[in-house]
Image (cartoon, grey):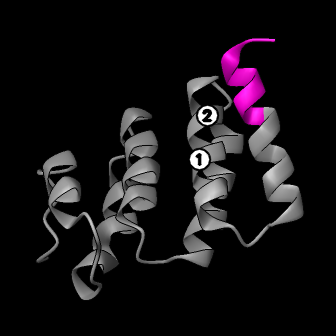
Amino acid sequence: MGRLDEAAAQLQKVVEIQPDNEVAQNNLGSVLLRMGRVDEAIGHFHSALKLQPNSAETHNNIAGVLFSRGQMDEPEEVFGGAKHRTFEGASQLARTVPKLDFNR
């Protein structure tokens, strides 16, 4: 079993025991994404956002996936409400997706 497999297995256990653990949900999504399990990853990112809607890291993760798939309208949809929220790590977010216009 590779390290990513081990990480995914451990994080899956955490999520099963603590489904309201936003950090575990987001981290599991990140690991699954690195494993190429994109649809599963997005599901965990969405679960994390339901638990912590102001997570810049999770918004960044979802938008990055959508952007890489060429779904250009959807990252803006994900970030479109961001102008009305306060994010920790907002400067990281701004550097990641600098071409989106939130003022339309």
Which region shows up in magenta? 1-8
For the N terminus, the image quarter is top right
Residue at left 66%, top 34%?
32
Residue at left 62%, top 24%?
36
Q: Residues within 10 Å of mark 1 (few under 14, many from 20)?
A: many
Residue at left 29%, top 75%?
87
- Left or right: 64, with 27 as reference point: left
Amino acid at dot 1:
Asn
* Rendered location of residue 52, percent (x, y): 53, 76
Q: Name the residue beneath numbered marker 2.
A: 31
The image's mark for residue 27 is 1
At mark 1, the secondary structure is: helix
At mark 2, the secondary structure is: helix
**Looking at the image, residue 20 lies above or below residue 68:** below
Q: Residue 24 or 46: which is nearer the viewer? A: 24
Q: Given the current orientation, which residue lies at the most extreme top position?
A: 1
Q: Residues within 10 Å of mark 2 (few under 14, many from 20)?
A: many
Question: Based on the displayed image, in which of its 4 quarters is residue 40 positioned?
Answer: top right
* Rendered location of residue 89, percent (x, y): 25, 63
For the C terminus, the image quarter is bottom left
- Left or right: 65, with 89 as reference point: right
Residue at left 56%, top 26%?
34
Residue 89 among those drawn in magenta: no
**Looking at the image, residue 62 lies above or below residue 9:** below
